[in-house]
Image: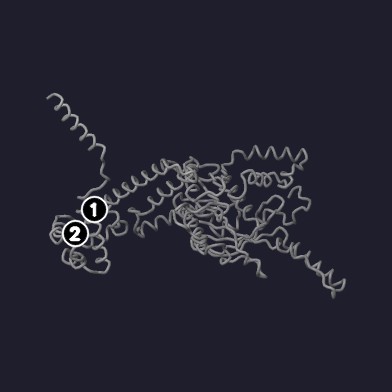
Amino acid sequence: MHVREFDVATSMIDIEESKESYRQPPNNIEAEMGLLGTVLGNNRAYERVSDFLEPDHFFDPIHAKIYDACRQLIERNQQANPTTLKHFFDGPEYEQIGGHRYLAELAGASFTIINAQNYGRLIYDLYLRRQLIELGTDVVNHAYSHDPDEHATNQIEVAEQGLFNLATSGNVDGGFQSFSDSIKDAVEMAANAFNRETAFAGVPTGFHKLDLLLGGLHKSDLVVLAGRPGMGKTALATNIAFNVATKPDMFTDDDGIDRPVTSPVVGFFSLEMSSQQLATRVLAENAAIASDKIRRGELNQPQFDDLVRTSQRLQATPLYIDDTPALSVSALRTRARRLKRRPEGLGLVVVDYLQLVHPARTGRELNRVQEISEITRGLKALAKELDVPVLALSQLSRAVEQRDDKRPQLSDLRDSGTIEQDADVVMFVYREEYYLQGRRPGERPDWTAEKRQQKQQDWENAIEAARGKAEIIIAKSRHGPTDTIELRFHSEATKFDNPEDSDGGPAPPDGNTY
């Protein structure tokens, strides 16, 4: 008897433990019934949830079918009620959803249209929780797998991309903003621009004419800087990054108070050059020493002393370089978020260059055009999420080389037209001097000595006129006009500067300084 009582007690404990171990996915059937009843009672309630709530968000598949049927009828400007839904489903399917009796019970319940959005938000929130559980389960299962070709870092990227997709799959806080609120935001932006010494609201690049034309690099903008090899696009991006990192600015702390900082943080993702190579360029620019002299060690003692002093002065510059090759969009996003959390605030993200970024791992095969499209959309989403400008460098196709006028055009952007579509600003770097140096005039048998001399002189004059000149062609700008501005380029130090800051003369040929 005692043994039987013990067995019964043990069985009851096992049942209770099994109940506790089984957890039903998050759901609220009453909220789903409440929303459907509200929509069936007043179709206008659908307008309050239609911009974010989908049939897949319902836990009960029958409720998902009813909501989908209501959506299709309402979007056709037809009434959705128990009578019209009967004609929407066939016989067995109509009985499967509960028939007229269940639909009438839903519609007859006392729900008000005011509660529709609250029901919708709750249903959507519970859907996200179920998706998080599913994503977490996949992460655990993949982590337990022993596939030697599946690296842990790749699994992390897949998990991060899944979380990002889930976070951006719907936005219940979106929708229209009143024009009154929009006007207030616009006036506040204008006031900030008016009160700044530079008279523009964007992040200053340090190049006066470029800043005046663009108004600076605007937050949440994707700015594409493109050019053929040898034009100096990486040098220009490095100059802009350094100028931003050393420009006094303001940041808003956690209490919403604007506080001055001496230098906002800049994140530079260098997928082509090493961090040491980029640092050498910055040193050469600031120490006024040719970068190739630094690399070869051809410095005299005073130059080396200047280099050491310059390096000590620049060590506090908040310019952070990530030279990890073949970064994915999701990994890039994660690392940029870390910089964003710094107290100084993130001022700019630079990606060098766009075609070397890996697209998100979606589990489906993509062609090159689709990959570039995924990358540009990911960079644009990053700019909006972090509320900073993203400066992405891009290659150009060889079509430029086939034209007499080798100034780039939007159609020359390599691999995808979506670069032009997704970018807020597209600008090209063009240096006529680069092409002239490769056009040394040949000799023809019928030329006289005077003719050969004249051709050589014309070529030398053209090079002298173009020496040190660089054109920045603004081919697209959402915020202002397109135009071309001129900068000075010092090839020995890989530095761009404003023409008014230069003496206007050619760079010294010996390459010691500029």
Q: How is the image coloured?
A: one colour
Badge 2 or badge 1: first in the primary sequence: 1
Instruction: Using the image, tell me which numbered label, if any, was put on residue 96.
Output: 2
| Residue 125 in picture, x, y percent from top left | 30, 49
| Residues packed near mark 1 inside 10 Å, few (<14), some (14 to 19) or many (20 plus) | some
> Can residue 274 be seen here?
yes
Residue closer to the observer: 286 or 170: 170
Label 1 sits on what residue type?
Answer: Asp
Residue closer to the observer: 249 or 170: 170
Q: What quarter of the picture does the N terminus occupy?
A: top left
Label 2 sits on what residue type?
Answer: Gln
- The residue singled out by tag 1 in the image is 60
Local secondary structure at mark 1: loop
Q: Mark 2 to mark 1: distance in Å?
A: 12 Å
Local secondary structure at mark 2: helix
Q: Residue at x 17, y 29 (%)?
A: 7
| Residue 184 in picture, x, y percent from top left | 39, 55
Quarter of the figure with residue 469:
bottom right
Residue 282 is left or right of residue 64, and the answer is right
| Residue 363 in picture, x, y percent from top left | 44, 53
Residue closer to the observer: 4 or 304: 4
Q: Nearer the viewer, mark 2 or mark 1?
A: 2
> Can residue 348 be seen here?
no
Residue closer to the observer: 378 or 162: 162
Q: Residue furthest right?
A: 449
| Residue 66 in picture, x, y percent from top left | 22, 60
Q: Residue at x 39, y 53 (%)?
A: 168
